[in-house]
Amino acid sequence: QVQLVESGGGLVQPGGSLRLSCAASGSIFNIAVMGWYRQAPGKQRELVAHITTSGSTNYADSVKGRFTISRDNAKNTGYLQMNSLKPEDTAVYYCNLNVVGNKWWGQGTQVTVSS
């Protein structure tokens, strides 16, 4: 059984930073592609960033240069460092693990960027 628990969301002013964490139980973390997705009200869920088992990363154009995805396989934990946050980054952020098409999702953590 794989469980993902996100944490680190909250309310931040524009220009601020947050660091999201995704703690995974089970034994698949080291062989999974890990991704962060987000869903804003009234919009579809979108990919923010993902990182492969070898550490290769990919980012949505809207967050390039501001967000950094990383993983610590020894801790079964992934991270999303978010800097220079904008109001349009407001969304529920979800962690995802993907192993050969099998996907697992966390419950999400709310990020609100507002003054």
Image: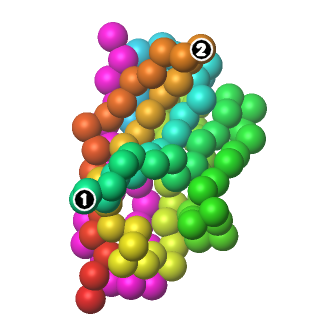
Residue 102, compared with residue 75, is above or below; it is: above
Question: How many tags in the picture?
Answer: 2
Q: Which mark is residue 101?
A: none
Residue 12 in the image: above or below residue 21 = below
What residue does disc 1 label? 41
Q: Can you tell which of label 1 and label 2 is closer to the viewer?
A: 1
Q: Would you say 56 lies left or right of 109 here? A: right
Residue 99 at x, y percent in the picture: 56, 17
Q: Give the extent of the magenta segment.
A: 1-20
**Residue at point 36%, 30% (across, down):** 105
> Which quadrant of the view contains residue 42?
bottom left
Residue 52 lies within the magenta run: no
SS for dot 2: loop
- For the residues labelled 1 and 2, the Cα–Cα distance comes to 30 Å
Local SS, label 1: loop
Residue 102: give x, y in percent of width and height.
Answer: 48, 15
Residue 21 visible in the snapshot: no
Q: Quadrant of the C terminus?
A: bottom left
Look at the numbered discs 1 and 2 and tell me whether their residues touch, using CB distance below 8 Å. no
Q: Residue furthest top?
A: 1
Q: Which residue is mark 2?
A: 100
- Residue shown at the point (46%, 49%) measured from the top left: 46
Residue drawn 68% across the image and 29% down it: 53
Q: Amino acid at mark 2?
A: Val
Please rate how many residues cluster around mark 2, counting C-alpha atoms within 10 Å: few if below 14, some from 14 to 19, many from 20: few
